[in-house]
Image (spheres, grey):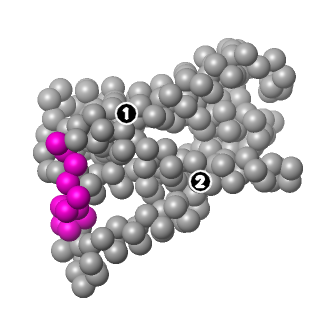
Amino acid sequence: MQKLYLRSNFKGNIKKYVLIFFVPTLLVYLSGVFYFLIFPHQFDPELPVLKEIQAATDSAGIPVQSLLLITILQTLLLGPVINIIPTMGEELGWRGYLLPKLREFFSDPVALVITGVIWGIWHIPVIAMGHNYGTDYPGYPWLGVLAMIVFCVTLGIIEGYATIKLDSAIPAAMIHSTVNATAALPIYLAKSGYNPILGPAITGLVGGLPLMVVAIVLLVIVNRSRNITKPCR
């Protein structure tokens, strides 16, 4: 019976878990910075999106800048654990079962990419319903599907690398949880009318470029590695 990578293997890997705790959030912030450097006209320091959210909630009495700071601190400190139960449910399937199975038949880089493609395709129904990208963009829904597959391959490489190195699906669930909790943060700084296919969220093709760079570096590392244990058939 195949193991599902449920053990954390925390002992001896504290530094790696610290990186897993904080780096995904920093990548989300970096995605926003990169997007607004490319599209500076889309940046709005008045936080119009956050003001709309504030008006619809019970936080109307809090200054919007303070609300942004609270949101950033919450996601930075709680992001890796706030969604851990639902993301662990997913990651036991993707990184705990599918990835090890694919590694039995393919090289690690190929297995990582295939897992990400399947993960992205799995999202087609919710993308068609407007998840992440809405429905009001040129090329709907297939351009959104393509962007989501690219994002899932990219994030899946990072999550899969963490799973392989730590022999556990828990790091992947933590990364997934962090991204779910923080992905919308750059949107708070955007003017209305931005194209979600491009960004500023990390799920966009431009906003996601910093994440892609990390994924490519990890693919190169995995491809050069000769000491990662393959799962037994």
Give the numbered dot on residue 95. none
* Residue at horizontal 36 percent and vertical 44 percent from the top: 33
In the rendered image, the quadrant that contains the N terminus is: top right
Q: Is residue 118 visible?
A: no
Query: For residue 171: magenta?
Result: no
In the rendering, at what x and y percent does residue 151 appear? 42, 33
Check contact, mark 2 vs mark 1: CB within 8 A: no
Secondary structure of the residue carrying tag 1 is helix
| Residue wearing tag 1 | 148
Q: Is residue 193 left or right of residue 85?
A: left
In the rendered image, the quadrant that contains the C terminus is: top right
| Residue wearing tag 2 | 22
In the rendering, at what x and y percent does residue 162 appear? 68, 38
- Amino acid carrying label 2: it is Phe
Secondary structure of the residue carrying tag 2 is helix
Q: Is residue 219 left or right of residue 54?
A: right
Asked where in the image residue 54 lies, by quadrant, the reply is bottom left
Asked where in the image residue 210 lies, by quadrant, the reply is top left
* Residue at horizontal 27 percent and vertical 78 percent from the top: 63
Query: For residue 50: magenta?
Result: yes
Q: Taking 166 as reference, is 179 above or below it?
A: below
Q: Nearer the viewer, residue 124 or 24?
A: 24
Q: Name which of mark 2 and mark 1 comes first in the sequence.
A: 2
In the rendering, at what x and y percent does residue 189 appear? 26, 55
Q: Which residues are magenta?
A: 41-52
Q: Is residue 163 left or right of residue 148?
A: right
Q: Taking 171 as reference, is 64 above or below it?
A: below
